[in-house]
Amino acid sequence: MRAAPARQVNAATTPRHLKPKALSALIQPAQAASFSIASKAFVALALPTLLAACATLQDAPRLTFLCPNSLRFEARLYQDMALLEGLRGHAVLERAADDSGEAALLYADATVRARFGLGLDGRLARLDYTRIPEPVYCERAVTARPGEPPAVSASDRPGPRPPPPRPDPNAPIETNIHLGDGRNGPG
């Protein structure tokens, strides 16, 4: 069996859109478009990751504290507030003035008063509940993360504040229009 002879391309009979110069003119915009799509996809995937990393860097570190009776909670300490999350829920404590002269961080609300950074190495926390007569002492859990400071300290930024509540769409609106409260005519 013989191989078929190579076919010669006749420039006069070849359609214009299949000529080499026309093909290269079609390929270049396609390559540019695919690069544009690939770069947009990369940005779309990288941007949320970058934003999440920036938010993590700005947020206060989560400090885990171990308390008696196998209780534990996590605290995030800010300049003006502390966020506590534990088995019984969460609490938002405002920074309170410390009149004792200690270098500890004091946060409080109506139900609990928390003092962080106690002890020789600053790893203890004291929780004074309004309904429990004795204080609860908790110790910061040992972490295996390198570079994490052993002492408890507040973050350099203010704490996150929730946005203001949305207005109630069913709330009455005060206007200067009065209906049925007297005479509406002249004189």
Image (spheres, rainbow, N blue to C red):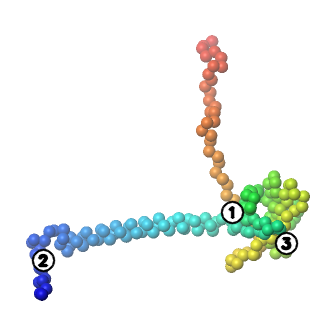
- Nearest the eye: 48 or 101: 48
Distance CA(mark 1)–CA(mark 3): 25 Å
- Please identify the quarter of the rendering in which residue 179 is found: top right
Residue 174 visible in image: yes
Q: What element carries label 1?
A: loop
3 or 2: tag closer to the N-terminus: 2
Amino acid at dot 2: Val
Numbered disc in front, either 3 or 2: 2
Quadrant for the C terminus, please: top right
| In this view, 125 is above or below 133 | below
Residue found at x 11% / y 84%: 5
Q: Quadrant of residue 177?
A: top right
Q: Is mark 2 on a helix, strand or loop?
A: loop
Which amino acid type corresponds to the residue marked 3 in the rendered image?
Gly
- Measuring from the top left, give residue 70's x and y in whole percent: 79, 68
Q: State the image quarter where residue 54 is shown.
A: bottom right
Q: Residue 157 carries which label?
A: 1
Q: Specify whether 26 is left or right of 43.
A: left
Residue 154 picture location, percent across and down = 74, 66
Q: Mark 3 points at which residue?
A: 119
Alpha carbon separation for disc pair 3 and 2: 90 Å
The amino acid beneath tag 1 is Arg
Question: Residue 74 location, x and y as percent?
Answer: 73, 65
The kind of secondary structure element at disc 3 is: loop
Q: Which residue matches tag 2?
A: 9
In the current view of this chain or complex, which residue is farthest to the top?
187
In the image, residue 71 sits, relative to residue 8, either above or below, namely: above
Q: Name the spot of residue 50 as percent of width and height, x first.
A: 54, 68
Name the residue rendered at 65%, 48% in the picture: 164
Answer with mark 1 or mark 2, whichever residue precedes in sequence: 2
